[in-house]
Image (cartoon, rainbow, N blue to C red):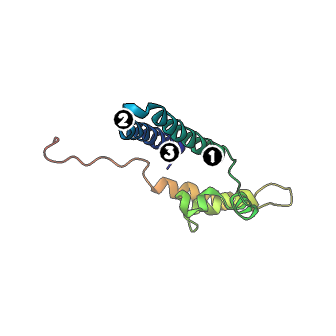
């Protein structure tokens, strides 16, 4: 749950605690009810401060994950929708790591294969109409 959810829960709990304390102590001990409500509000504020401190901490990416993200092209990452055996992955890997003696990538063969594979795949398939929708 996020910080906003915890804050809403805390506010509802403080209202409930204040109402419960007021109802339980009745009019003859209003000072005690107010003190109990003040204590519950202080506890809620302390909890909200802790949530805010935890939520404001930066996210730390360890060195192993950082190096993996830097080395593997997106086209090769399965979690990002890529396929390690695809032509797109081979092309991106060649651009990233393949260098000739002139310090430039030499990926013309893979580029030609990529262009051919993209020509075979239609960009957008024609929608199929049901008999109810039209002709």
- Give the percent coordinates (x, y) of residue 99: 80, 60
Please tell me which of labels 3 and 2 falls first in the chain.
3
Kind of element beneath mark 1: helix
User: How many neighbours does mark 1 have within 10 angstroms: few (below 14), some (14-19), or many (20 or more)?
Assistant: few
Where residue 24 sits, quadrant-wise, is top left
User: How many neighbours does mark 2 have within 10 angstroms: few (below 14), some (14-19), or many (20 or more)?
Assistant: few
Disc 2 to disc 1, how far (Cα)? Answer: 33 Å
Residue at point 40% right, 36% down? Answer: 22
- Give the percent coordinates (x, y) of residue 23: 35, 37
Checking the image for residue 6, the label placed there is: 3
Q: Which residue is mark 2?
A: 26
Q: Nearer the viewer, residue 64 or 37?
A: 37
Checking the image for residue 34, the label placed there is: none
Q: Nearer the viewer, residue 44 or 66?
A: 44
Kind of element beneath mark 3: helix
Residue at point 53% right, 35% down? Answer: 38
Q: Nearer the viewer, mark 2 or mark 1?
A: 2
Q: Nearer the viewer, residue 1 or 11?
A: 11
Kind of element beneath mark 2: loop
User: How many neighbours does mark 3 have within 10 angstroms: few (below 14), some (14-19), or many (20 or more)?
Assistant: some
Residue at point 52% right, 46% down? Answer: 2
Where residue 66 sits, quadrant-wise, is bottom right
Disc 3 to disc 1, how far (Cα)? Answer: 11 Å
Count all numbered tags in the image, as a single digit. Answer: 3
- Give the percent coordinates (x, y) of residue 79: 54, 61
Tell me: 23 left or right of 36. left
Checking the image for residue 50, the label placed there is: 1
Please tell me which of labels 3 and 1 falls first in the chain.
3
Disc 3 to disc 2, how far (Cα)? Answer: 30 Å
Q: Nearer the viewer, mark 3 or mark 2?
A: 2
């Amino acid at each position: 749950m996020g910080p906003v959810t915890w804050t809403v829960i805390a506010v509802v709990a403080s209202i409930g605690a204040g109402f419960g304390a007021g109802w339980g102590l009745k009019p003859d001990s209003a000072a005690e009810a107010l003190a109990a409500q003040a204590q519950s509000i202080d506890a809620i504020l302390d909890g909200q401060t802790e949530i805010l401190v935890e939520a404001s901490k930066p996210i730390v990416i360890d060195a192993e994950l950082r190096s993996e993200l830097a080395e593997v092209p997106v086209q090769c990452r399965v979690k990002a929708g890529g396929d390690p055996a695809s032509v797109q992955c081979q092309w991106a890997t060649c651009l990233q790591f393949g260098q000739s003696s002139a310090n430039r990538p030499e990926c013309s063969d893979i580029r030609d294969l990529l262009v051919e594979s993209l020509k075979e795949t239609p960009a957008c398939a024609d929608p199929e109409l049901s008999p109810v929708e039209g002709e």
